[in-house]
Image (tube, rainbow, N blue to C red):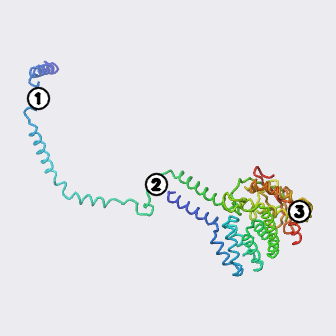
Amino acid sequence: MDDRQLDLMLKESFNLDVDDQAHVLDGMEGRVLEKIQPQSLDLMLKESFEIDVQARAHVLEGMEDRVIEQLLEQPAEKTSNRWSLFPRLPQLNLNFAMAGAFAIVIFLVGNMVGDFWGSPFGGPDQDYQGVTFVVAIPEANSVEVVGDFTSWQPQSMTRDDNGVWTLAFDLDPGRYEYAFVIDGQEWKPDPLADEYVKSYNSTNSVRYVSSEGETS
Amino acid sequence: MTMKTVLALVAVVLLAASQAFAFADENDVNNLIDSSSISSAAKGTVAQGFLLGIDQGRLTADTAFSFIQQIENSGGDVADRQTILLTVAQTLLNDTPVEMLINKGGEGLARGLQLNVIATEIVERQQTLLEVKTMLNQKGISIQQQQNGPGFPRVSVDAAVTDIATVLENHVRSGNNPNDGSLLAASLTTMQRDGRITSDLLQTLTSVLTEGELAGIANNISNRL
């Protein structure tokens, strides 16, 4: 008889024994539970837990001191500055923050500039009209506009490649006196003015601005 | 760059901008007049006039401050400075617009003229403004003192007075004949182009203004020059 045949015989014998004793296992779980009362189960669990706690009691000795010691050893968070008075800002994308801040600055400064050049003699702000002043003086090094709409403070014009100087203003409808100042010295009337008037023994140009458009 | 840096930069820019475009207020105007070189007696009238004008909305505190400062810094004779400031103040106390006077003052300074030349021009033009304003008042054109009350808005009446005075002054100073019959048409055209004058005031002016009365004021201008 070889080993393989022996294994097969033992296996068949084991299966026969199991089959013969299988009836013993039927209903065993129920019979065990009937023997153990609920009170005695609780008692058994409690005793088992107390034994475990007593076995581990030495671990709890000095735990509070050890926890405090560990906390002190950890590095403190950076909260000790004036910004901590305010609620923490969410971690925004700084590009958005920069763009927002820039927009606020532009808005506020724009308002200030707008107020600065607003109507100096009071009254309600009216519908501003874009008015462009144009003069061709190729030989000039600088050309400025002065007028009652600039409080007679010179405003530099921009030169193009052909020597044409331009500058635009937003003006209320009305009548405006002005002149061009060439190279910071010579006052000249505008050849394209609506009319001319004498002022201080010189000539001022006059531009009318209507509510519909640049000039009437 | 942290959020703190961004906020700090915004604060710095706003502070710089607010300094660059700082507006003067009535206290600044008052303090400037108080520290000016004009006589103590004149200071009271000048302050009273300018502050009334600011309060009525005839000029902004910033414009008043800038004008007084320019005159003070012009380096001219104290008497001329006082004449200019007193003339503007008295015009305001007479419930009359000063836009033309301040513009002519600014223009004279920008042209680098002597202060006495500017003072003379301002006094002459003040007379014209007062005459035009009196003429309109006599025709029942006055400034509305309260909302829905009789009269016209201050801005409109002031614009009409300024426009008519400007036309008459320019006509005479340009060497034209005060009696050439063109003053009424020129005045009405200028006022029609001025967006500040309400249509009902314009209609009233068209019906009550006469060439003869305008010519009378123009002749007075001619006599003063």
The chain holding disc 3 is: B
The span from disc 2 to disc 1 (Cα, nearest Å) is 64 Å
From this view, report whether residue B124 is shown above or below residue A91: below
Looking at the image, the residue that sits furthest to the bottom is B40
**Residue A199 on image: x %, y %:** 84, 66
Q: Which one is in front, A3 or A184?
A: A184
From this view, report whether residue B107 is shown above or below residue A159: below
Where does label 1 land, which residue?
A30
Disc 1 is placed on an element classified as: helix
The span from disc 3 to disc 2 (Cα, nearest Å) is 75 Å
Instruction: Give the position of the C terminus of chain B as an image quadrant.
Output: bottom right
Q: Quadrant of residue B20?
A: bottom right
Disc 3 is placed on an element classified as: helix
Where does label 3 land, which residue?
B212
Looking at the image, the residue that sits furthest to the left is A35
Q: Which mark is residue A89?
A: 2
Q: Amino acid at mark 2?
A: Leu
Q: Quadrant of residue A64?
A: bottom left
Q: Mark 2 and mark 3 in contact (Cβ < 8 Å)?
A: no
B7 vs B84, left or right, is left
**Residue B179 on image: x %, y %:** 92, 63
Q: Quadrant of residue B186?
A: bottom right
Q: Mark 3 and mark 1 in contact (Cβ < 8 Å)?
A: no
Q: Amino acid at mark 1?
A: Gly
Q: Amino acid at mark 3?
A: Gly
Q: Identify which residue is drawn at 68% across, 64% down.
A: B57
